[in-house]
């Protein structure tokens, strides 16, 4: 029996929910309420509220009919659950490694979240791009990634005939890179991290003019101040205390697709070749 492509994302979701389930309604109670902790939490709350005044989305220019984007930075492979000072942008975390690339490609949303009767192909939301360029750190070369939706059951009876799988393909390219780039950075200061606050910047850039087309600034903090009592994962818990908010409960499970969602508001994917990606019999 072949492993469904959703397995990888299902494991991540399960880990997230388990970790968050250990917190949320219990995270404050699980921390010993001594005077030092209370004082630290108060400072963190005040600092977080002050940072939130500058948080939010700023879209300066939108572009229609974009075929591809250049991901200038790829999310790390590992999830940061509790490293207080690792500047790896816990707020911006959604997918890791190649999965981050996949999330921007046409067909990803339908394959992992949509239904067979989902009119996603007629909607700009999560439509995705025809291709994505990224630099492979291992060799320093730029590769172009495209998505193929395969139906292996057409020729392989071990699969159901209507089973479809999302496959990532890449080729080395030396032609001009996409005009529009996407990058992120952790903007936390040492003082903020001392109080378990993480800051994030996600930018969309016109690489031809060096113009910033849009930027999203976000912050989150852990009211438990890094406690790991009961299996708490501080940075997953912190997603419940975020601005812009991911939601009042289990915010970390709502972090997925956040980068693609924001970029899609700025760089509207073209509908050229909309159906060409759908099926490749194999």
Image (cartoon, helix red, strand yellow):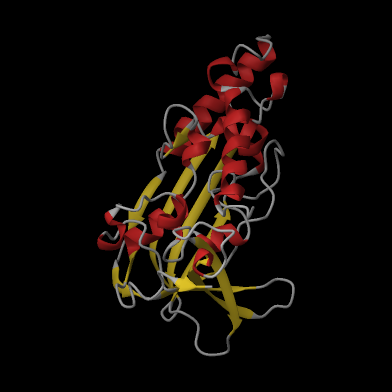
Q: Is residue 63 visible?
A: yes
Residue toward you, 61 or 38: 61
Where is residue 155 shown, x and y percent of the image? 54, 70
Q: Does 16 appear above or below 124?
A: above
Question: Residue 197, position in %: x, y?
Answer: 58, 36
Q: Nearer the viewer, residue 162 or 143?
A: 162
Q: Is residue 102 left or right of residue 269?
A: right
Q: Residue at point 66% right, 16% down?
A: 37
Q: Farthest residue in the front direction?
A: 157
Q: Which is nearer the eye, 117 or 100?
A: 117
Q: Residue at x 71, y 42 (%)?
A: 85
The C terminus, quarter of image: bottom right
The image quarter containing residue 156 is bottom right
Which residue sits furthest bottom? 175
Where residue 196 appears, as percent x and y from the top left, is 63, 33
Residue at image location 31% in from the left, 73% down from the top = 270
């Amino acid at each position: 029996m072949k492993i469904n492509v959703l397995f990888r994302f299902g494991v991540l979701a399960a880990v997230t929910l388990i970790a968050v389930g250990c917190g949320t309604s219990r995270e404050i109670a699980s921390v010993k309420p001594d005077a030092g902790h209370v004082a630290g939490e108060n400072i963190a709350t005040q600092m977080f509220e002050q940072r939130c005044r500058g948080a939010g989305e700023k879209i300066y220019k939108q572009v229609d009919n974009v075929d591809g984007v250049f991901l200038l930075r790829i999310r790390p492979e590992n999830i940061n659950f509790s490293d207080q000072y690792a500047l790896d942008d816990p707020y911006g975390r959604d997918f890791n490694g190649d999965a981050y690339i996949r999330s921007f490609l046409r067909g990803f949303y339908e394959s992992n979240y949509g239904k067979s009767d989902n009119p996603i192909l007629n909607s700009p939301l999560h439509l995705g791009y025809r291709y994505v360029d990224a630099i492979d750190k291992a060799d320093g070369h730029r590769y172009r990634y495209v998505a193929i939706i395969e139906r292996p059951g057409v020729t392989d009876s071990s699969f159901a005939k209507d089973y479809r799988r999302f496959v990532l393909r890449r080729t080395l390219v030396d032609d001009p890179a996409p005009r529009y780039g996407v990058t992120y950075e952790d903007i936390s200061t040492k003082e903020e991290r001392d109080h378990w606050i993480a800051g994030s910047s996600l930018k969309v850039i016109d690489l031809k003019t060096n113009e910033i087309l849009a930027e999203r600034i976000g912050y989150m903090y852990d009211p438990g101040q890094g406690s790991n009592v009961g299996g708490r994962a501080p940075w997953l818990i912190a997603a419940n205390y975020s601005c812009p908010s991911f939601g009042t409960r289990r915010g970390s499970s709502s972090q997925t697709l956040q980068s693609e969602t924001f970029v899609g508001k700025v760089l509207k994917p073209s509908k050229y070749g909309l159906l060409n990606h759908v099926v490749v019999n194999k």
